[in-house]
Amino acid sequence: MASNFIDYVKIYCRSGKGGAGSMHFHRAKYLPKGGPDGGDGGRGGSIILHGNRNLWTLLHLKYQKHIMATDGGRGGESRSSGKDGEDRIIEVPCGTVAYDGDTGEWLCEVKEHDERIVLLRGGKGGLGNWNFRTATNQAPRYAQPGEPCQERNVILQLKVLADVGLVGFPNAGKSTLLSVVSAAKPEIADYPFTTLTPQLGIVKYRDERSFCMADIPGIIEGASEGKGLGLRFLRHIERNAVLLFLVPAATPDIVGEYNILLSELEKYNPELLTKARILAVSKCDLPPYNEEGEILPIPSAKEISDQIGIPVVHIASYTGMGLDELKDMIWTELNKEQNQVIEISHAPIEINQIERDEPQAQDDEDEEGTIYLNEVEEEWDLTKYKGIGWDE
């Protein structure tokens, strides 16, 4: 399933051009001067984004690189209009953001189910000569051409919709926490970057209430500059109302590690610092040890909270320690008025930064004897190729 999670695609889109209007004159046996009756051209098809809550990935667009609507038909005689072009509807999951594929400019975002956004509008059909008749120009011999089509490269990025986002270094216990408090089954192992794709889970709360929690791959220092997997998946916590930071209890400097994570989020998008934050000191059932093997005390929640200014809770996912208190903290933050509306401003993206360099077609130094058919040189001496079948 991890390989099927696609949250980034680049496609080429083209709307349909409008049909040309008709320049036609009515002809009948008993009506020699019937006058103009050219019809209008049809409207070109549009490219439309449609939100679909039944989709959770952009996998269906991975191998569909060209999406083109049909052109409008030409106008006909007897004031008959041309056929409208067919629209192309692109089904996308809720939370999809569209960018210009060449400049990185933000275009639109689809946030709700059944929401329709016209990405590229089809060209209008041209008017036939029937529309240009006047008392002084009773036989216009011209008609309008249809409007041209629109085309552009489009980047679609999925930013998952969740109430709580888990933020932490690799092996901080994010996947274990998600698997304990929800029915999600993320991969859990004792090596870094076991989570390669975002995972969503529904956390049950008291009185049949619930909230959605998202686990993203671990962040390392320098993730905002493209190191590790952080840059690719940091977009998935932009919509979260609450950010839950996880730092293992065995970390020598809990506050310092929290500040590193906070700095990476600020470098990626400064608006993330305006969201509500909670720090959970994870793996408290595995306390730190010194070089002599003695158990070291874990700083208290109040001591850490006084330094960073946010709520702090100690948890242990395997034993269930502190999980109820953590849920209470999250629910309290989610119901605060300032956290109800999740609005983010999408900054333009750096095309060269998010796209991998394409492999070069040839090496810097060509092998000796390589022949290129598009080279402009003097006439080739084919005698040296005799004996390999070319002279037969």
Image (cartoon, rainbow, N blue to C red):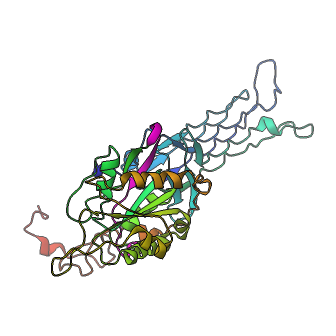
Quadrant in the rendering for residue 373 = bottom left
- Relative placement, left or right, of 231 versus 123 is left
> Residue lying farthest right?
135
Quadrant in the rendering for residue 203 = top left
Tell how many labels: 0
Q: Where is residue 344 in the image (x, y as percent from the top left)?
A: 57, 60
Q: Is residue 57 visible?
A: yes
Q: In which quarter of the image is the C terminus?
A: bottom left
Question: Does the stretch in magenta take in 216?
Answer: yes
Q: Position of residue 367 (x, y in %)?
A: 19, 78
Q: Is 204 placed above or below 340 here?
A: above
- Relative placement, left or right, of 364 versus 113 is left
For the magenta stretch, what is the residue range? Answer: 206-224
Q: Which residue appears at 82% of the width and 30% of the height?
A: 35
- Relative placement, left or right, of 52 versus 198 is right
Q: Which residue appears at 49% of the width and 58% of the height?
A: 242
Q: Which residue appears at 49% of the width and 63% of the height?
A: 277
Residue in front for this viewpoint, 227 or 119? 227
Q: Where is residue 109 in the image (x, y as percent from the top left)?
A: 55, 52
